Amino acid sequence: MAISAILAAGAEKATAQNDNFEYNNERFADLQMLRYQVKGFDQLSLKQKTFIYHLQEAALWGRDILFDQNGKYNLRIRRIMEDIYTTFKGDRNSKDFTAFEVYLKRLWFSNGIHHHYGCEKFVPEFSRAWFEKEAERVMNEDKMLKPYQKQLNEIAEVIFNPNLMQKRVNLAEGQDLILTSASNYYDGVNQQEAEEFYANMKNPADPHPVMFGLNSRLVKKNGKIQERVWKTDGLYGEAITHIVDCLTKARPFAEDAEQQAVIDKLVEFYRTGDLHTFDEYTILWAGNTAPQVDFVNGFTESYGDPLGLKASWESIVNFKDMEATKRTETLSANAQWFEDHSPVDSRFKKEKVKGISAKVITAAILGGDLYPSTAIGINLPNSDWVRKEHGSKSVTIGNLTEAYNLAAKGNGFRDEFIIDKQVLQLVDQYADITDDLHTDLHECLGHGSGRLLDGVDGDSLKAYGSTIEEARADLFGLYYVADPKMVELGLTPNMEAYKAQYYTYMMNGLMTQLMRIQLGNDIEEAHMRNRALIANWCYEKGKKDNVVELVKKNGKTYVQINDYEKLRNLFGQLLAEIQRVKSTGDFKGAQALVEGYGVKIDPQLHKEVLERYEKLNLAPYKGFINPVYTAVRDAQGNITDVKVSYDESYAHQMLRYSQQYAPLPLINE
């Protein structure tokens, strides 16, 4: 597709300009697109700007990897639909085309045909006959699609058959989680076979176990199970080669020799696929805290794998917000105090907290599983033994949090769901402060706290591991945001502020996060399960003392907290139990907590929340359009400056990425 064709496809220019920045942008389906501003970029040195430029190129080259990881048909479907979108000659205001356009935009947002958060497959509102007619046309015209013309019916079935590939990640108890999940991490194997394969690879006596399965697809061919490793000469090699090339170009502009060593080791890992090399890379990365510019690039989080083993590809390039980082540095400097005063059993505490570094960052680019929807905080690496012996790096992404907060101002949500004016005033006054602090505590200290008992397998909680880990970090933050230590350290202004976080957290966990789930469905996503688990457990355990109530006012349900101090004690009790489950590898304990408190939904309350939220006319999910970086070069090709702009529309950006950063074949086997 030529750029001229993309521009002709109606990829309208956005209104946001550098001198009059607007955070809100396009809205469609249940999604709102936002922009984030890269404040401070112009003040960076040319060397830093050049470093960021090459790193952001590396961040964009991994996009196809995630599409394919999320489903084996995604790249073919995206190509067909983008061809239809850019070459359609009919009525672009017709019912079929407008519905098709929304579907395509949702596909872009979710990096595939399943919802990025709920994991259910999108329901197309355009007709199958219309799609097949247009698909047949473009498959005949596009040389890249011609080999797949005979697959059109198969591809259409994947899109239109509601019973086929229903969920990208299925976590329903009692089902084969691999065979019922559409994600593309396994081929020809079932859950039992996969679990046995990786169990047989482990040595219980190894104090430094690698994260088996992290960077591969597990396949069965001719009755033999083997791994297809993601590396330069392996699966996804076409994309990884480009990533390595960009990292190599970035290397001379790294801020110190240690950061160059980080890049060297990451490149080595990409070339070999060796998981021992990956651990060496993460150790170097976690210890490299001096540079202002930093990045994540690689196979990182395992939420997309129902077994929690295989990692999706992601990237973020960033630089430190020097002023805001004072807050997180205060927390990391006191990390041992927090560990020592935690309410968990002393057996599960770290005797000596090592290497916890924390900072507030400005995101410069988002890629892979961090784009367009992204986290607001990150704590890495994920290896338990690396964290224990070498520490971790935690970040809160300040400019993204700012974009979310500014986009939400005055949208009516708080007025609708907060119980009274007194609590609303409390939330309006302190929620932004305490939300940021809770994120800091969650990422900087929560994930880095506690320890596994000797001999406990880090994968022992299986499909429940991600939910338990997120609950552990959330509870750590909830327990400590109310501690007098926060006032002593100057992180909260008084002992009233924490109540804003407690109220909004319980309101979200018990009620308002349900706006993101279709009526009749269970809670599937790990972070949502975590919040429901915490809120429902505390609600139930606090009934005797009437700690938290769900009350009716004018026919509407509201959360009412009657005793904030007792609620904090409940958070502490649950933190102690969650840490015990994690530290001992208690699978049945994890199962009971998640299934008992984090999955099921009261249908009447769910219906009410959906109806109330619908009247607000708000989008429950938000994501970001990336800024555009342009290198200014001299006659010799040397970069003399890097400019950042914010005038690219969502559709234009997605189509441009598909043209410029799409190295993979449409089927990757």
Image (cartoon, rainbow, N blue to C red):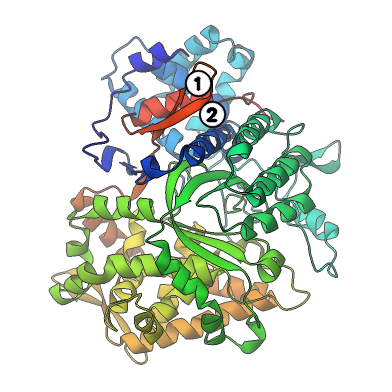
Work out whether mark 2 precedes mark 1 in sequence or the reverse, and give the earlier one: 2
Mark 2 element type: helix
Which residue shows up at 61% across the image and 49% down it? 256
Q: Which quadrant is home to the C terminus?
A: top right
Looking at the picture, which amino acid does disc 1 mark?
Gln
Q: Quadrant of residue 90?
A: top left
Which residue shows up at 60% across the image and 35% down it? 65
Residue 87 is situated, as x and y percent measured from the top left of the image, at 40, 12
- Disc 1: CA contacts within 10 A as few (<14), some (14-19) or many (>=20): some
* Residue 295 vertical position relative to residue 480 in the rendered view, above or below: above
* Residue 554 vertical position relative to residue 160 in the rendered view, above or below: below
Residue 345 is situated, as x and y percent measured from the top left of the image, at 60, 88
Task: State how far apart marks 2 and 1 are (Cα).
Answer: 26 Å
* Residue 663 vertical position relative to residue 602 in the rendered view, above or below: above
Q: Nearer the viewer, residue 604 or 228?
A: 228
**From the viewer's perspective, is the residue at label 2 or at label 1 nearer?**
1
Residue 651 is situated, as x and y percent measured from the top left of the image, at 37, 27
- Disc 2: CA contacts within 10 A as few (<14), some (14-19) or many (>=20): some
Looking at the picture, which amino acid does disc 2 mark?
Glu
Give the residue pinned by disc 1.
Answer: 659
* Residue 625 vertical position relative to residue 406 in the rendered view, above or below: above
Report whether 522 appears left or right of 580.
Answer: left
Report whether 442 appears left or right of 30.
Answer: right
Give the residue pinned by disc 2.
Answer: 157
Q: Is residue 551 visible?
A: yes
Q: Nearer the viewer, residue 593 or 383?
A: 383
Which residue shows up at 47% across the image and 42% down it? 366
